[in-house]
Structures are given as C-alpha cells and as structure tokens.
Image (tube, helix red, strand yellow):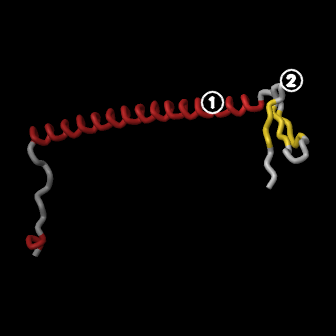
C-alpha cells in the first residue's frame, strides 16, 4: 500500500506531495494554498453568520408586523363590540326549523 508524504518546501513555502517509494514529487501546491483554503473557510463562516443575522432581522420585522396587525384587528373588534352594545343586537332573529312548518 502506497502512502504519500506532504512536505513544506523551505524555499517557496509551498507544499509538495511526495511518493515515499520513488522519492519523486507527485504534485506541488503553490505557497499560500493552505492559507487560501483557510480564508475560504473563514469567509464561509462569516457569510453564514451574516445570513443568520439577516434572518434574525427579517424574523423580528415579521414579528413586529404581525403584532401590529394583531393590535389593529383587536382594536377593530373592540370597536364593533362597543357599537353592538350601544345599538343593541340588530341581527335577524334565529329561524328554528319547526317554525317553518
């Protein structure tokens, strides 16, 4: 079973993938390759946090809007309730099925 060895080049600070049996360089990665992947990870983490905060802001805005709508509907309900109490019940009398005979 063949394993590869990863070595940091002392001159260019790049990474080398070396075959231990032959001693030949299989692949080379330019300097900063590892740092770029770390930066990608950090940038992805920052993006996730920003998306999370945006979602939180949207949720709070939606919650505020729903509470305002609830308050408006409660106020309208109370106004109609007060109006009915002042005017009395103006709905038509209940029709019972045996009254229709």
Instruction: Judge whether 36 appears above or below 4 on screen.
Output: above
Of callouts 2 and 1, the N-terminal one: 2
**Residue position marked by numbered label 2 in the rendering:** 11
Q: Kindly identify the residue that appears in the image at 64 percent across and 34 percent down.
A: 41
Is 66 situated left or right of 85 in this image? right
Badge 2 crowding class, 10 Å Cα cut-off, few under 14, some 14 to 19, many 20 or more, is: few
x then y, percent, for residue 13: 81, 26
Which element carries disc 2, helix, strand or loop?
A: loop
x then y, percent, for residue 81: 16, 41
Q: Which mark is residue 5?
A: none
Q: Quadrant of the N terminus?
A: bottom right
**Residue position marked by numbered label 1 in the rendering:** 42
Outermost residue toward the bottom in this view: 101
- Give me the C-alpha separation between circle 2 and circle 1: 27 Å
Instruction: Judge whether 92 appears above or below 63 on screen.
Output: below
x then y, percent, for residue 23: 89, 42
Q: Quadrant of the C terminus?
A: bottom left
Q: Kindly identify the residue that appears in the image at 35 percent across and 37 percent down.
A: 66
Q: Kindly identify the residue that appears in the image at 11 percent across and 58 percent down.
A: 93
């Amino acid at each position: 079973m063949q394993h590869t060895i990863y070595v940091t080049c002392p001159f260019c600070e790049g990474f080398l993938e070396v075959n231990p049996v032959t001693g030949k360089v299989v692949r080379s990665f330019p300097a900063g390759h590892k740092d770029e992947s770390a930066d990608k990870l950090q940038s992805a983490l920052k993006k996730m946090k920003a998306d999370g905060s945006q979602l939180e802001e949207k949720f709070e805005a939606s919650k505020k809007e729903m509470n305002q709508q609830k308050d408006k509907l409660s106020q309208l309900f109370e106004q109609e309730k007060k109006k009915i109490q002042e005017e009395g019940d103006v709905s038509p009398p209940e029709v019972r099925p045996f009254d229709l005979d």
